[in-house]
Image: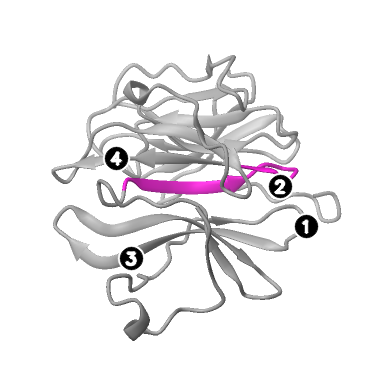
Amino acid sequence: MSTTWRRRPPASCSPAKTPASPTTSRSTPPDGSKVLFIRAFGPFLETGQSDCGLWIGDVESGEVTQLTSNTDPPCDREYTPHFSPDGTQITYWRDPFEDGQPTETSVWVMNADGTNARQLTDPEMFAGEPDWSPDGELIIFSTYAWFEFQCCQASNLYRMHPEGSGVKQLTHYPDASLRATHPRYTPDGAWIIFTSVMPGTTPSLWVIPAEGGEPIVLAQSGVHTHGTWQPTPGTG
């Protein structure tokens, strides 16, 4: 896959592919030279967009290149792409749809140029929302991502190595009375910040030790989601 544009093409040149507004899911490598993002194309059909995928943009030149494409079936969604700390790999999750409903989800990794895409988790696990540990040795993810599954499933946090081995469950919530989602490592890799969701309450931010353990509530009494810990200036 190698589709490269320097700017949005005129509508007359691509009547079947008018880019939709990009989502807010994006990531940059350590040197800040690239931006990774999601892009979807019209026409927008009953089954979804005609194509969607992950793209990478060069900050200096403005050139953008399509890394993945999903046209058959239209738009198996790919979400939350993140560069590995060394900038050589990308992790993301795929969310195939059928009759307007997600059928399975799984965590993937590929090279930063879009080659060698490989699935890391069993689709029946419904894994999603992956991110890297600061040293690049682990990937954290959740099951039944709250972004997509907003009712009645148990969501827990797991970690694994980038090739899919060593899967370890970090939270053990048995049902939807308490869900853990949106995980991110702290910059030192010692903690994981995540969104806690309980029925009848607004989501809040919690942290747990990176090896698992008792959570600590950081923020509640309001809507708090998608926490990210700021690195110490000059260290990351």
Q: Identify the residue shown where x is 56% and y is 76%.
A: 6
Query: Mark 4 is on which residue type?
Result: Pro
Query: Label 4: how many residues lie within 10 Å, few (<14), some (14-19) or many (20+)?
Result: many
Query: Mark 1 is on which residue type?
Result: Asp
Query: Label 3: how many residues lie within 10 Å, few (<14), some (14-19) or many (20+)?
Result: some
State which region is magenta. 76-90
Residue closer to the observer: 92 or 19: 19
Please give the label number shown on residue 96.
4
What whole-number distance in Å separates the C-alpha atoms at marks 1 and 4? Answer: 32 Å
Name the side, left or right, on which 154 lies relative to 165: left
What residue is pinned by disc 2? 87
What residue is pinned by disc 3? 41
What residue is pinned by disc 1? 31
Q: Identify the residue shown where x is 29% and y is 40%.
A: 96
Query: Label 2: how many residues lie within 10 Å, few (<14), some (14-19) or many (20+)?
Result: some
Mark 1 in CB contact with mark 2 (< 8 angstroms): yes
Mark 1 residue element: loop
Tell me if residue 230 is in the magenta stretch.
no
Q: Say if 129 sits above or below 169 in the image.
A: below
User: Is tag 2's residue or tag 3's residue first in the polypeptide sequence?
Assistant: 3
Mark 4 residue element: loop
